Amino acid sequence: MKTINYDQTILTVSCYRKHMILDTKYYVQVLPNQLILSNSPRQINPKYILEFSLEKKIHWVTKNKTTILEQFGFQYKGKIKYFYGQSTDLYKLKDCMQGQIMYKEISDFYQPLSLLGKGGSAKVYMVTKKGYNEKYASKCVDKRYLQEDGGYDALFNEIRIMQKLKHQNIIQLVDLYEGESTFYLILEYLAGESLHEMFNQRQTILEHQQIQMIMKLLLQAVSNMHLNGVMHRDLKPENIMFKQLNQFDTLKIVDFGLATFSSAEEYPFPKCGTPGYVAPEVANLRDLKQKYDMICDEFSVGCIFYKLCTNKELFPGNEYKEILKLNKKCHLNLDSLAIYKTPQEACDLIQKLLKINPKDRMTAQEALSHPYFSQKFETKKSKFQSSNLNKQNPVFQTQNFQPISKLINIDDDEVEDENCKQLQVPVMNDLKSFGLIAYSNLEKNKFQINQNGRRNFKKCQTSEFEQHQNNLKNQVNNSKPSFILKSDLNEESQQPKQHCQKHNTLINNFLKIGGKQEMCKIDEDIEENGYQI
């Protein structure tokens, strides 16, 4: 029996097992890879030792189908032994071991909300944890599809890899459950779209600053995978997702169904991936027992980088066989990078990630030190703001605005004779000099106001008012709105300079092409599962 290193204890709680006469108390201690129940802390020979394994299961019992935990149990010598404890302690124990061992009774802890997607052997549901508002994704794998072609081994391999990878840019495995006919993988929920969906929805290329961020996070995640001895083997836009919509700093690598440990004696599905993103040493593999290096993932990263910069596939084709043929030949044409004005540092990094010979290819860790990531790119918004600061084209000059006159008290009882002069409405004769305000009539009015000391109104009887209203309507119909014509500008120029200086002008200057005004046009910047080859 191996010596137990109690210094690695992660959690200690107490529980008890019911007996006919006297209940037995146990100390429950969680270590990195095992669960120990002993009669005393740090016992040399504890009675119960449960090694964490995907073949082992822990049962949880709630009180009357509520969320209150009462018991947990596991199989021991052919029987399930149950232990009682405080609900809070049992939840601590459950959370401490989750994702490391299979649990039973998923319906007591998770509530399905909606179907997110489905594949050949699995369905993915959005679920919520009972008693909490947190959302998760539940990958439900039917056991019937695992009985052939090493299905169980492939699933357990995927789980072990996800248990190993703990990185903010890699989707996290939260919990594991086993039902009578289904395995349930509880994963963190990603509300954002995939890179593939983003390419399909956008008609324009991302800004260089956004591409730089995506590539840095992607390379950091790949570097972490490789440090843990894992190669993904199916990196493509469909498997790059975002936890939050339109937030590129929430990037996540997903779908480890074709991933493998580089230390494996034989790779499962050695010739695999998605045509168009497969490294040439994998696509052209003949001896299926021959091993290749983890740097095959970097070639896939280079393909993704190229598409980010050009919105085009590195190996374009309409059919699977056509794309695979181009992928195998690997005749690279990177001319589109220059067409789309890709920065020189980005072009250099793409070329180094796409080296045909894996020995010449740059690793993810080396790529993170490339000069490309020290470059600073301006966003279109900041460029627009800086360009506006340089332009001195104010629309309104509020400091030049002068009030016509001070407000004057008006008595409603003040009247004038019927023969008094009526206020004339300025007429607009030419729209080309739009913005100049007629001033002459205003001056005449002002003179009258100053002379009389107050504005006069005409008092009329009802019949007189109607007749007067008709006269006014005729006058208005025979007149035009009055903004000054260009020809009128000559007349204005004959007025004294001091008079002209009083004009309050708001002039819109438009671009003129061939003597005509033109409007300025503002341009707007506007394969699924991994296949075995």
Image: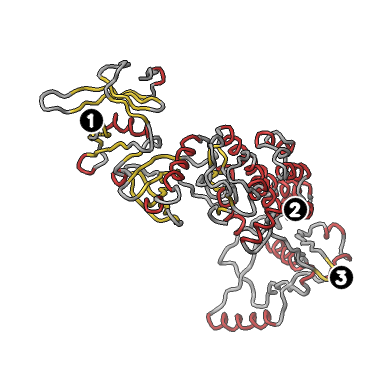
Q: Which residue is mark 3?
A: 514
Of 509 and 476, which appears nearest the observer? 509
- Displayed quadrant of residue 52: top left
Instruction: Please give the count of numbered marks on the rendered protein.
Output: 3
- Displayed quadrant of residue 228: top right
Label 2 is placed on what type of residue?
His
Q: Residue at x 41, y 56 (%)?
A: 115
* 409 up-or-down from 517: above or below: above
Of 385 and 20, which appears nearest the observer? 20
Closer mark to the observer between disc 2 and disc 3: 2
- Report the Cα–Cα distance between label 3 and label 1: 91 Å
Disc 1 crowd rating (10 Å Cα; few below 14, some 14-19, many 20+) is many
* Rendered-image quadrant of the C terminus: bottom right
Q: Earlier in the sequence, mark 3 or mark 1?
A: 1
| x, y percent for residue 260 | 53, 41
Say which mark, if any, is on residue 331. 2
| x, y percent for residue 40 | 27, 17
Say which mark, if any, is on residue 83. 1
